Image (spheres, grey):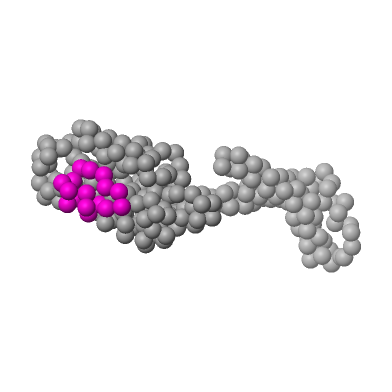
């Protein structure tokens, strides 16, 4: 992007300067010749590039240069704006990670890729244990801070091919491409442990004296053949983890 910011204005600016010198200035001299001398012909060309009209030629060259530079910057600025709009459309406002809309779009693509190449893809669905209790005691601002910190910890704890999104409220999802059940259970346990051991603010007020998460896991294609089936399976496993006492991983 930095290269484009320099390269495009230089290219368009040079083209604009040449157009100003070789086109705009001669055109102005032709108009002057026609309206003031009532003459048609090529006599305006020698005058255009003569020393007597050098200042005027530089004037039109400068106009062309500035117009070219602006024209070169414009598409770059538009591309930056469009990229920013797209980033906002797929990003959760609070946590800064991907949002639910992006999750469904990207997860569908991952499942299609897994189907095409005969590979497994895992889905982790998790939420914060007793989050309502934390919110009721400390207020929504502290609850929002907890969500942001937890999203940050999860994001730095997943592997490079994986991606995380906020599913809604205190629920998050992690998609792990090319991951079988054994590996995804290891990943889920790692995430659970990271959150359990982190010294979150006001964690002592929670029923267990710490912030914990429960995780439900589903693996494609054993647990589902579509996005809806995989989400349903992981969600069901998450509820089982809750029923079993929270702060644990359950596989679909």
Q: Does residue 6 sit above or below 112 in this rendering?
A: above
Quadrant occupied by the N terminus? top right
Taking the spot 29% from the left edge, 39% from the top edge, the residue there is: 189
Taking the spot 66% from the left edge, 50% from the top edge, the residue there is: 68
Given residues 22 and 187, the one toward you in this image is: 187
Q: Is residue 165 visible?
A: no
Residue 232: where, in percent of width, then height?
31, 59
Q: Is residue 5 left or right of residue 97?
A: right
Q: Does the magenta run of residues contain 250?
A: yes
Q: Does residue 164 sit above or below 44 in this rendering?
A: above
Q: Magenta region: which residues?
A: 237-252
Taking the spot 89% from the left edge, 57% from the top edge, the residue there is: 43
Q: Is residue 204 left or right of residue 72?
A: left
Q: Is residue 28 left or right of residue 212?
A: right
Residue 230: where, in percent of width, then height?
36, 57
Taking the spot 26% from the left edge, 35% from the top edge, the residue there is: 193
Residue 7: where, in percent of width, then height?
64, 42
């Amino acid at each position: 992007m930095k290269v484009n910011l320099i390269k495009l204005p230089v290219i368009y600016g040079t083209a604009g300067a040449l157009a100003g010198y070789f086109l705009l200035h001669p055109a102005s001299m032709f108009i002057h010749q026609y309206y003031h001398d009532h003459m048609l012909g090529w006599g305006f060309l020698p005058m255009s590039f003569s020393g007597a009209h050098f200042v005027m030629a530089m004037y039109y060259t400068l106009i062309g240069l500035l117009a070219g530079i602006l024209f070169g910057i414009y598409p770059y600025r538009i591309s930056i704006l469009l990229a920013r709009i797209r980033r906002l459309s797929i990003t959760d406002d609070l946590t800064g990670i991907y949002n639910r809309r992006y999750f469904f779009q990207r997860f569908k693509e991952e499942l299609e890729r897994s189907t095409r190449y005969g590979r497994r893809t895992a889905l982790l669905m998790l939420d914060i244990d007793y989050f309502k209790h934390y919110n009721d005691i400390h207020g929504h601002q502290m609850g929002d801070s907890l969500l942001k910190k937890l999203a940050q910890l999860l994001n730095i704890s997943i592997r490079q091919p994986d991606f995380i999104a906020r599913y809604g409220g205190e629920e998050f999802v992690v998609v792990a491409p090319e991951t079988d059940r054994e590996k995804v259970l290891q990943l889920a346990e790692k995430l659970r442990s990271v959150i359990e051991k982190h010294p979150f603010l006001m964690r002592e007020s929670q029923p267990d004296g710490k912030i914990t998460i429960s995780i439900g896991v589903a693996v494609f294609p054993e647990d589902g053949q579509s996005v809806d089936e995989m989400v349903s399976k992981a969600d069901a496993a998450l509820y089982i983890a809750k029923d079993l006492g929270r702060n644990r991983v359950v596989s679909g």
